[in-house]
Image (cartoon, rainbow, N blue to C red):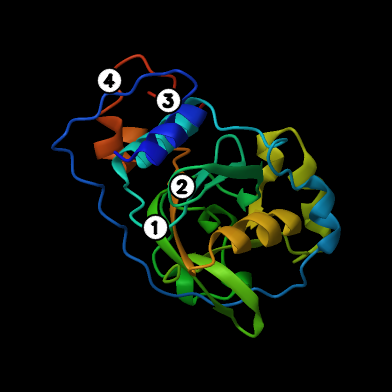
Amino acid sequence: MSSRRRVALKAFALGIAITIPASMAPAQSFQRDHRSALDASVAKDATAIAPAPPNSRVPSGIAMRLAAWVAATADNGDVPFIIVDKLDARIFAFNTRGDFLGSAPVLIGLARGDDAAPGIGVLKLSQISADQRTTPAGRFMAKFGAAEGHAKVLWVDLRDGIALHPVMSVNLGEHRLERIKSSDPEQHRISYGCINVPAAFYDDVVLSALTGGAAVVYVLPDSKAVAEVFPVFAATLGGGHDGEQVLADQ
């Protein structure tokens, strides 16, 4: 591990030691492909709720441990990485070395679940049922791309149409701007599966950090066990850690 990675690890590991086997191979990338329709305009007045260091909330619990593991093992390769904690409705961004860049609240899929519905990437928004509106969990190699004529978005899972983009007013009745400010994580479940972030966080952190055009995005599960989604990472944790049972009923 480089000296810079050691510094980054200490900065957000909060004194918790993590033992990582020397022979451990990085987790494999999840497959990615396509989707359509992001029909709305970016809500610029969301800028007031986009914290940046030193005021950002640092990761804690399982998100912090995952960030420490990624930095220690260089699982992100030579690109920045992002962690989305669905249960806490929060996003955390890091540069290539693992330095913490900032965090913000997020809006995620309306329904709980860690898998995208089969074939959802080719459906129109009007064809997607409430129980299909999930944000899939896993490790994704994300890249910027166009979204049907709109400003570029970060495609997390192109095949299933999962993108990370500024919060958008798709339907005024959904009250997305109010929801993203709520302290109740359940109020943050409203999207069709995409990850919505405050516009300022997207502009100031995501776009500035991902100048190379790509990032690894880790989406923590809300229904499956962490070990099922990130088995190599989970193997380093042992019993009794605070992210041991990340289940839908928590």
In the picture, the disc for residue 248 is none
Give the amino acid at mark 3. Gly
Q: Which kind of residue does numbered mark 1 sit on?
A: Phe
Q: Nearer the viewer, residue 100 or 164?
A: 100
Residue that badge 3 annotates: 243
> Is residue 38 left or right of 35 when viewed as pictured?
right
Separation (CA) of disc 4 from disc 3? 11 Å
Q: Give the Cα separation between the discs numbered 3 and 2.
A: 14 Å
Dot 1 or dot 3: first in sequence order is: 1
Q: Earlier in the sequence, mark 2 or mark 4?
A: 2
Counting every numbered tag in the picture gives 4
**Residue at image mark 1:** 140
State the separation of the CA atoms marked 1 and 2.
Answer: 8 Å
Q: Secondary structure at mark 1?
A: strand
Name the side, left or right, on which 141 lies relative to 236: right
SS at circle 4: loop
The 10 Å Cα crowd at callout 2, few under 14, some 14 to 19, many 20 or more, is many
Q: Which residue is mark 2?
A: 219
Residue at the location (32% across, 23% down)? 18
Do callouts 3 and 2 mark residues in contact (Cβ within 8 Å)? no
Crowding near the residue tagged with mark 4, few <14, some 14–19, many ≥20 C-alpha atoms within 10 Å: few
Residues tagged 4 and 3 counted as in contact (Cβ below 8 A): no
Q: Name the residue type under label 4.
A: Gly
Label 1 – label 3 distance at C-alpha:
20 Å
Q: Which of pointers 3 and 2 lies earlier in the amino acid sequence?
A: 2
Residue 114 x/y as whole percent: 43, 47
Location of residue 1 in the rendering, given as x and y in whole percent from the top left corner: 29, 38
Kindly identify which residue carries mark 4.
238
Q: Residue at 45%, 67% (x, y): give it.
A: 160
* Quadrant in the picture for residue 56: top right
**105 or 130: nearer the eye?**
105
Q: Position of residue 71 (x, y in %)?
A: 38, 40
